[in-house]
Amino acid sequence: MNRLFHVPLSPFCRKVRLSLAEKRIEVELVEERYWEQEPDFLRRNPAGKVPVLKMGGNTLAESGPICEYIEEVHPEPPLMPREPLARHEVRRLVMWFDDKFHHEVTSKLLYERVNKKIMGMGYPESKNVKMGAQKIKYHLDYMGWLLDQRRWLAGDVMTLADFAAAAHLSSLDYISDVDWNRNATVKDWYAKIKSRPAFRSILADQVPGFPPPQHYADLDF
């Protein structure tokens, strides 16, 4: 059995979960308190981070390389286009969300509101929360601009770029930090992607002490 060591609201773990589910690859989810730096976990990934995927006798770390490995070993249905320029655009947008969006938004909202409490690191910094709440507006507007030109974020078909974006936004939606009324096009895109069977386990997540809003698992918002 494949095993994914993860935490439920991690966007990096969610991106891997979505990739596996879209390709109908069964996996056992194992919640890992990675911040405790247990020796057994550090042997799996010396970097001490999730996700870590055990698959086919191999232990894989880092969400980007994991998703590319899954794509190469299980190419159907494809989450990466064949053309080099199109593949570049997917990778660019994956990095946009996993780097820029993560730094400017996810780390300022999700990590301050949830991770600090779970890890026993104190209270949220209001300055960071305000900054994240402001920055997400720019990102939603950029997504709206992309989707005004394309059916999906990176082009005419759904790709890993959509899963990267949805992984971050779904984690923030769990704590009601996404204003879906800011851009109708983005809201329609998210409704479409969260209606996919691959999203079912994501929408079923429950984090003790942090109940999701009523609309979180509602496919029609």
Image: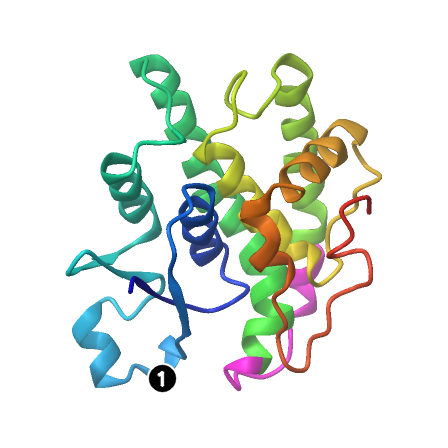
**Which color mode does the image show?**
rainbow
Label 1 residue SS:
helix
Is 198 rendered above or below residue 2? Answer: above
126 within the magenta span = yes
Residue 218 place in picture, x, y as percent:
78, 52
Residue 10 place in picture, x, y as percent:
49, 61
Disc 1 packing (10 Å; few <14; some 14–19; many ≥20)? few
Q: Is residue 71 left or right of residue 122?
A: left
Hey, which quadrant is residue 172 in on the image?
bottom right
Q: Which residues are magenta?
A: 118-130
Q: Is residue 27 left or right of residue 93?
A: left
- Is residue 131 in view from this perspective? no
115 within the magenta span = no
Q: Residue 62 or 16: which is nearer the viewer? A: 16
Hey, which quadrant is residue 210 in on the image?
bottom right
Which residue is at 67% across, 42% downward? 195
Q: Residue 154 or 142: which is nearer the viewer? A: 154
Residue 46 place in picture, x, y as percent:
19, 69
Residue topped by disc 1? 36
Which residue is at 79% across, 64% downward? 213
Q: In what quadrant of the picture does the N terminus appear?
A: bottom left
Which residue is at 68% across, 82% downward? 209
Hey, which quadrant is residue 55 in on the image?
bottom left
Residue 129 place in picture, x, y as percent:
68, 61
Which residue is at 32% across, 13% downward? 83
- Is residue 145 in view from this perspective? yes
